[in-house]
Amino acid sequence: VVTSDSKNGIYQATASLIEKGCRNIIFISSFLATYVSTNRFEGYLECMHDHGLSASRNTIIQLESGPSIVHSETSVYNYISRGNKVDGIICTSDNQAIGAMEGVKRRGLRVPEDIKVYGFDNQFQSRISTPTLSTVERSPSSLGRISSEVLMNLIRNKPAEKTTVLSCSLVQRESTAS
């Protein structure tokens, strides 16, 4: 198995928001039941706990669809409209984060001045969104290269590592600027 350390990637993103002064950080996911999103959720919860901040059912938005920009926008708009305090948003995909930024703007607030936002995956649209989106990079080219090497070793009957976990890194852009 070749994978990325999504849990630590989300932990780093959450810690970055805390370092920038955010205290009311919400988590948006559409796949809490899957292994990958569960790891990401655990990273968020662990970081919030490590920093003495509250994470409860009220700080989690689980989208009923896939990582949809429209559903994320609507969910964030409604969340803020109900009077919930939020100054940071962690999303399990860049699409969700772009939708979240639109929901923030539609509510009359500003990214990053009022609410800072992180996505996940460093997809192309994160570089062209307004503002540009800070995100967690999991290096898909390295994942692909190492997966190919593992496969070739298996074909050649060579031993392979049972699990290879690659680290994630933060890509800082405008959506989390101080």
Image (cartoon, grey):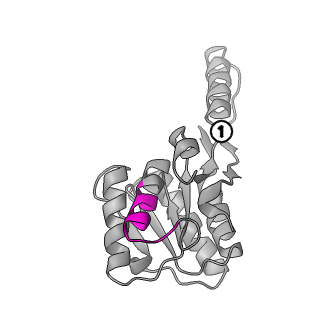
Q: Position of residue 99 (x, y in %)?
A: 40, 55
Q: Please report the bounds of the magenta region as a residue range.
A: 99-110
Seen from the viewer's position, the closer of residues 133 and 38 is 133
Is residue 80 toward the left or the right of residue 97 in the image?
Answer: left
Is residue 51 toward the left or the right of residue 72 in the image?
Answer: right
Badge 1 density bin: few <14, some 14–19, many ≥20, Cα 10 Å: some
Give the residue at x 64% y 70%.
Answer: 17
**Location of the N terminus (image quadrant):** top right
Residue 105 lies in the magenta stretch: yes
The secondary element bearing badge 1 is classed as loop
> Which quarter of the figure has residue 111?
bottom right
Q: Give the residue furthest to the top.
A: 156
Give the residue at x 38% y 76%.
Answer: 80
Residue 178 lies in the magenta stretch: no
On the question of residue 122 being in view, the answer is no
Give the residue at x 59% y 65%.
Answer: 43
Q: Position of residue 93 (x, y in %)?
A: 48, 51
Q: Position of residue 57 (x, y in %)?
A: 39, 78
Against 163, is 79 above or below?
below
**Location of the C terminus (image quadrant):** bottom right
Q: Position of residue 59 (x, y in %)?
A: 44, 76
Q: Please name the residue that numbered disc 1 is placed on.
A: 139
Three-letter residue code for mark 1 = Ser
- Name the dominant secondary structure of the magenta segment: helix
